[in-house]
């Protein structure tokens, strides 16, 4: 009588496949917008995570009459 053992299992190292490009952020994943109404009536909409220094420069440039 011939006895067989369990089939041999070999480990295969995973191959690195090129990753697909990240899809464009959906509306839920985009940074929320903050709306700033300037003294001269202009409206500035910026991402909530804008750098404070950048926001100051924008307001300074746009808030002049």
Image (spheres, helix red, strand yellow):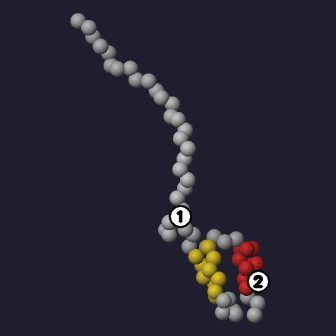
**Which of the 4 image quarters holds residue 42?**
bottom right
Which mark sits nearer the N-terminus, 1 or 2?
A: 1
Task: Give the x, y percent position of residue 32.
Answer: 56, 73
Query: How crowded is the residue under tag 1: few (<14 C-alpha within 10 Å), some, or many (20+)?
Result: few
Image quadrant where one finds the C terminus:
bottom right
Left or right of residue 30, residue 57 in this image: right
Task: Give the x, y percent position of residue 51.
Answer: 70, 71
Image quadrant where one finds the N terminus:
top left
Task: Give the x, y percent position of residue 7.
Answer: 34, 20
Most distant residue in the left direction: 1
Query: Which label belongs to residue 13?
Result: none
SS state under label 2: helix
Residue at 50% across, 34% down: 14
Left or right of residue 64, residue 45 in this image: left
Residue 63 lies, with reference to residue 20, above or below; the image says: below
Residue at 76% across, 83% down: 61
SS state under label 1: loop
Left or right of residue 1, residue 62 in this image: right
Residue at 58% across, 76% down: 33
Query: How crowded is the residue under tag 2: few (<14 C-alpha within 10 Å), some, or many (20+)?
Result: few
Name the residue nearer the viewer: 4 or 23: 23
> Contact, CB < 8 Å: mark 1 with mark 2?
no
Residue 11 lies, with reference to residue 58, above or below; the image says: above
Query: Which label belongs to residue 25?
Result: 1
Most distant residue in the top direction: 1
Residue 6 lies, with reference to residue 17, above or below; the image says: above
Task: Give the x, y percent position of residue 3.
Answer: 27, 10
Query: Which label belongs to residue 61?
Result: 2
Mark 1 and mark 2: Cα distance apart in space? 29 Å
């Amino acid at each position: 009588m011939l006895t067989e053992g369990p089939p041999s299992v070999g480990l295969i190292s995973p191959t690195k496949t090129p990753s697909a490009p990240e899809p464009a952020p959906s509306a839920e994943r985009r940074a929320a917008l903050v709306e700033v109404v300037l003294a001269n009536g202009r409206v500035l909409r910026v991402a909530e995570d804008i750098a404070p220094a950048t926001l100051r420069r924008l307001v300074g440039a746009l808030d002049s009459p």
